[in-house]
Amino acid sequence: MRAIRTAVCAVALLTCLALSATAAAEPVFSVHGASGAGPTRFDRVLVQRFGPKSARTVLVLVPGSTSGAGVFTFVARDLVRRVPGLQVWAVDRREHAFEDTSVIAAGDPDQALAYYLRGQPVDGRTFNPPPASEVPFMGEWGLGLLLGDLRHVVQAARAGGRRVVLGGHSLGASVAESYASWDFAGRAGYRDLAGLVLIDGGLPVAPSSLTEDEARANLTAIKTEGPRVDILRSGRPDLYGILSAVAGLYAHKQPQARSPLEAVPSLPFQPPFPSTNETWLGLASQLLYPARGAAAAHAGRPADSGDPRPWVDGDITPVARLAELLTQTPVNTVDWYVPRRLLELDIRAAEPLAATPLTRLLGLRLTHRAEVQLPLYAFATSSSGVLSRARRFVRASKVRRPTFANDPAMTHFDPLTAVPARNSFARTVAPFLRRLAGRAR
C-alpha cells in the first residue's frame, strides 16, 4: 500500500499548489465524488475551471478514453473568449489520484526521463507506481461510478441556479449521452442539463457486440489479469501517459535536439530515422490516431531529410502547441491508469443506450434515452460514423432541431488542439453555446 499512499500524497501536494497559484493559470479544485470500491480517499475528482465567476452557464467537459482533463485547456480558453457568460469545467476521472506527476511538474525532461523510464532516483525518490495487486478495487470502477462522480460535478456546477451543458470528446461524448439517459435513483440524468455537446464521439445506439458470456469472462479476466488497460501492451499500464508527458517536455524544452528517447530500448515505438524531439512527438501522436483522407494534407509530418530529421507543421495543430499541452500538471493531458471495466465492458454494453439483459447484468441504469429532450450539438472530424451515430441518438430520443458540424480536414484531437483561427469546432459550437448562455440571463 506504500505506493498508493505515495501517489495520493503527491497528487494532493500538486493540487494544493494549483489552488494557490491561480494567478498564473486557471484554478483546479476537488469535487467529492460518489461512494465507490476502494478507500474513501479515492472518492473525489479534480476539475479545472475556465471563464468568469459571473457566468450563468457552465459547459462541463468529459475527456476521452486515454485523456485527462488537461486535454481541454486550449479549447476551453478559446470557448470562454468566444461565448460571453460561459464557464468551462474540465473533469478528470478519479484514477488521476494514482499519478505521481511531481517530476513532470518540475519541468526538467532529463530528470523526467531518469525518474519515470530509467528507474533512477530524483531528489532522493524513486518512481513507485502501485502494482495491480494493490488496486484490485479498480476492477469495479466502471461507467456507473464515473457517472456518479460526474453527477456530483454537475450538481456543483448547477449551484446558484446556473445552467449546465454536458459535453465530451470521443469516449467522453459517449459518457455524456449515457448521463442524459441514466436513472439516478428515479431522476433522469437529462433533467440536470440544458444541452449536450458531442465532440467526435458517441455511442452507436445499436445492439452491443458484447455478449453476456463475454461480459462474464471479461469480469473474470479483470480480476485475474489486473484492472487497468495497458494501452501500448508493454506490461506497464502507465507507460502511454508517462511517455506522452516526457516526450512533450523534450519537445517543449529542446525542440530541435535529437531525441534521447531513441536510446530507451524498452519503448514500443521508435521512428525509423534519427529524429528531433518534435519529430519524435509528432510521429508518436499519430500512432493511435493517424491522419487519413483529407486530414493527411493538413497534419504535420517529418521532413524529407535531416540528421536528426526535423518536423514540418501542418496548418491546424503545430507540434509545439501539442508539446505545451502535454506538459500540464496537476491535471494532465493523458490518463495514466484507465479502468478496464469502463472501456472493455461497460461502454461496450451501453452501446444501445437502453435497458438490455447485458446492462442489467452489469448494473447499467440506461432507461431514459427515449425521453431525452435537450438541445444537441455534434461535431465530426475525419473519423467515420460519428454524425450517423448522433443522428441515431436523435431519432431514438425527443431531441429536436439538433446542430451537426464536421471538418474532414481535422484529425481526432484537432478540435481540442487546433489554433483558434483554424478550429472549426470552436467556431461552430460557439453560436450553439451563445444561444444557451443567452437563455440563462
Image (cartoon, rainbow, N blue to C red):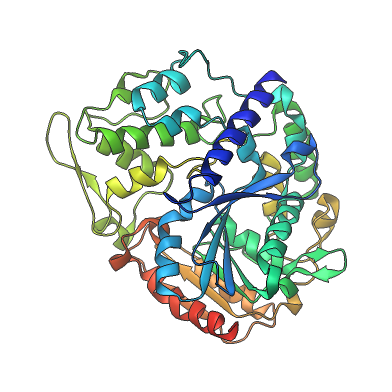
- Label total for image: 0
Q: From the image, which quarter does the N terminus lie in?
A: top right
Q: Quadrant location of residue 398?
A: bottom right
- Residue shown at 63%/47% (left/top)? 93
In the foreground, 17 or 138: 17
Q: Judge left or right: residue 159 versus residue 295.
A: right
Quarter holding the C terminus is bottom right
Residue 311 in percent (x, y) is at 21, 42
Residue 365 position, x and y percent, is 81, 61
Above or below for 114 versus 378: above
* Quadrant assignment, res 49: bottom right
Q: In x, y percent, where is residue 246? A: 39, 31
Q: Nearer the viewer, residue 21 or 249?
A: 21
Give the residue drawn at x 38%, y 30%: 269
- Which residue corresponds to the image point at 23% horizontal and 31% vertical from the top-left? 275
Up-down: is 89 above or below 197? above
- Outermost right residue: 186
Q: Note whether residue 286 is visible.
A: no
- Say whether residue 276 is left or right of residue 232: left
Q: Up-down: is 431 above or below 379?
A: below
Q: Position of residue 97 (x, y in %)?
A: 64, 37
Res 267 → quadrant:
top left
Residue 222 visible from this viewpoint: yes
In the image shown, does 262 or 331 lie closer to the viewer? 331
